[in-house]
Amino acid sequence: MSLALPVGKNGIGWLLPALIIAGWEVASRAGVMPANVLPAPSAVAEAFWRLMLSGELIRNIGVSTARALAGFAVGGSIGFALGLANGLSTLSRGLTDTTLQMIRNIPHLALIPLVILWFGIDEEAKLFLVALGVFFPIYVNTLLGIQSVDPQLVEMGRVYGMDRRALFFRVILPGALPAIFVGLRYALGIMWLTLIVAETISASSGLGYMAMQAREFLLIDVVVLSILIYALLGKLADSLARLLERLSLGWHPAFQNG
Amino acid sequence: MTAASLTAARSFAATPVRPIGSVEGQRAFAFRHAGKRFGDKTVLDGIDLDVPAGQFLAVIGKSGCGKSTLLRLLAGLDRPTSGSLTFGVAEEGHSRTRFMFQEPRLLPWASVVKNVEVGLTGIATGSEARHRALDILGEVGLADRADEWPSVLSGGQKQRVALARALVGHPQILALDEPLGALDALTRIEMQQLLERIWIAQKFTAVLVTHDVAEAVALADRVVVISEGRIALDLDVPVERPRRRGSVELARLEGKILDRLFG
Ligand SMILES: Nc1ncnc2c1ncn2[C@@H]1O[C@H](COP(=O)(O)OP(=O)(O)OP(=O)(O)O)[C@@H](O)[C@H]1O
Ligand SMILES: [Mg+2]
């Protein structure tokens, strides 16, 4: 089983992005691509260096990451707990699942005006939106994972005298784990998406705020830089989740060819 | 696999003959007028079956006649709706009954040896559990596969792991629900020999449900046929071990059972 990040394993995947960037640079220098539409990669790199030196970039990345993780921790743990409860107890499921499925059909970003009315543009607003966005993928997939655990294995566990605790940790949770990871990776995507939107609309710090400020001052290189950093952070989160997945699902045939 | 099965076959042939019902006088379990209904469908209706400890019992019957239901009662997975089931050593009861299913039912996320250790739940943990699990894996010829995932094993190997899991806790009673049904003919014979060898060594009571009449007479001390919810035939197999497959004696008994099934 290889533990390398999927990125490292096929360097060929980076060939196309590198070619695109090179082409973009050439087009900018030749004047085909006006700088006020899309700045050259070198200009973006310069902006990156400038903001690194001033400390602004690190600070804003820190603020955004902290928000993302806080919202993820809150929404993710509630979703996970409810998913477990509803997967294991028919009473709990009967009580809450219908309500949750109804709420799920409201796009959480549609709540932004309401959230601003409730919380203003404070941290709570972003935390709430991210938590809500992350909650559903985790909840739905945890529940699905538990419901799809092979009942024959559960019966086997009972016959061999496992108590409820052993049954949960040795049969049900490992069986639900592949689905839970699907939920996790999906939730990480939603986490960044929600944060970008929330920070762009209302914030006084963070990457989204930095991008909006730059737009007002027509610093298009900084705008492009913010977008790229969002992309990198998203990719990083996904790679981490994949690494965790590989580490804990080594038994799964899908992970045994590495 | 080949080396292991050769050892299995050799020690099988070398095993001394074991007298039928050698644990004298003791009873393993008894069904008394036991019945089982699902809704208004009566599956078992007045089963009387007294099994002495150490006996190898085979249960035969047409599909849907209630063989699995009988085993589930024995393993405590279901309760009889009428009549009773008693065990020879009452306080041990279901807890010393192990069940081997038609499918291996191994945990895909646990290594082979960890799967065997499941059979020691509540009996042993830690290094003692691992030690005992490795021992029994050796007996089924899979000691060298202990740390692999079940998904890389063949069907017959998976069933051997399941057998090791069932046996590692030294059960008093081993209930087997067509555990060899899905195996190819050669692997099947190998598994039958392995099962017989371990049964002779461990002296548990075996209850084997099977569709295969030849398998039943080759392995069992006693064969019961279930039909319409009752025991339609209760036949001793007084043939010395090791038994020779296809011998005249076994064929005669086989014919008798088939007559009862289709007559
Ligand atoms: N939980 C249940 N609820 C309702 N009916 C059941 C249930 N379990 C078994 N039955 C019925 O009881 C009958 C006997 O089932 P059982 O599984 O014991 O048959 P079997 O002899 O093992 O058959 P096979 O050889 O095909 O495995 C069948 O008609 C089956 O539909
Ligand atoms: Mg059956």
Image (tube, rainbow, N blue to C red):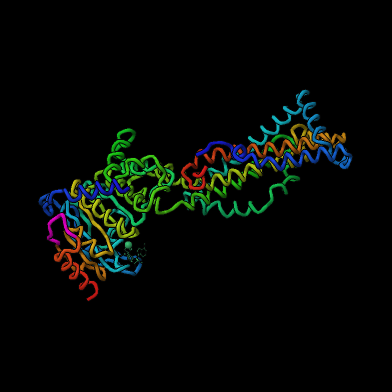
Q: Nearer the viewer, residue B216 or A218?
A: B216
Which residue does the image show at 29% across and 65% down from the upper left? Answer: B66
Percent position of residue A73, x then y = 60, 37
The range drawn in magenta is: B237-244
Drawn side of residue A197 relative to residue B120, left or right? right
Left or right, B2 with respect to A147, comes to: left
Per the image, is B213 magenta? no
Residue placed most toward the observer, A4 or B74: A4
Nearer to the camera, A107 or A224: A224
Does residue A51 appear to the left or right of A103 in the view shown? right
Q: x, y (%) of residue A108?
A: 69, 48
How many callouts does the rendering have? 0
In percent of the image, x 49 and y 44: which residue is there? Answer: A256
Image quarter for residue A191? top right
Give the image quadrant in which the ligand numbered 2 is located: bottom left
Residue B87: x %, y % from top left:
20, 52
Q: Is residue B224 above or below residue A191?
A: below
Q: Quadrant of residue A151?
A: bottom left
Q: Is residue A186 above or below residue A56?
A: below
Task: Indicate the position of residue A49 as horizontal and vertical percent values.
Answer: 78, 27
Task: Give the vertical position of B130 relative to B78 (above or below).
Answer: above
Q: Main secondary structure of the magenta part?
A: loop
Is residue A33 visible in this depiction of the protein?
A: yes
Image quadrant where one finds the C terminus of chain B: bottom left
Q: Is residue B239 magenta?
A: yes
> Outermost residue toward the bottom?
B263
Task: Give me the residue at 56% from left, 53% from top.
Answer: A97
Q: Does residue B177 appear in the picture of this structure?
A: no
